[in-house]
Amino acid sequence: MPDVRIEDLYSMLVSSVRYAMGRKTYVVGETCDIVRRYRKHLREDQAMIIVRDIQRELDMVERMDFTLGHDQDHRQWKRLVVDLLGGGTDA
């Protein structure tokens, strides 16, 4: 793997998550998988910012009785939050 600074990795992951939220394409699953794959390289505060961003969007759409993307996408985002909080298994 190329030498990537943690700050750069974090910026790329946050940008990917923010781009993918609300999309209705394969990019949601890809993004969730990539975040899980590189989670171990993030500081706790960085992971929690990603959780906060996702949870904020989930809360907003759920209050309006919508989903964040397709139903499947919504479930993937919820699962990623659980995984990042340590309640799931890493991919």
Image: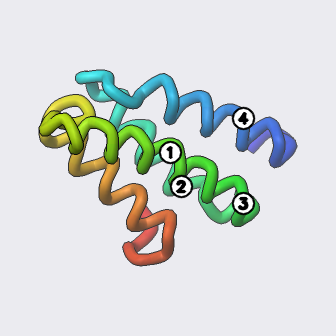
Which secondary structure, mark 3?
Answer: helix
Residue named by callout 1: 34
Residue named by callout 4: 11
Residue drawn at x 24%, y 23% as measured from the top left:
24
Most foreground residue, 52 or 7 = 52
Quadrant position of the N terminus in the picture: top right
Q: Position of residue 18 (x, y in %)?
A: 51, 29
> How many angstroms separate mark 2 from mark 4 (CA)?
15 Å
Q: Position of residue 50 (x, y in %)?
A: 57, 48
Residue named by callout 2: 37
Q: Amino acid at mark 2?
A: Arg
Tell me which label, 3 or 2, sits earlier in the chain. Answer: 2
- Discs 3, 4 touching: Cβ within 8 Å: no
Residue drawn at x 65%, y 64% as measured from the top left:
40
- Discs 2, 1 touching: Cβ within 8 Å: yes
Residue 91, placed above or below residue 89? above
The outermost residue toward the front is 63
Q: Nearer the viewer, mark 3 or mark 2?
A: 3
Q: Nearer the viewer, mark 1 or mark 4?
A: 4
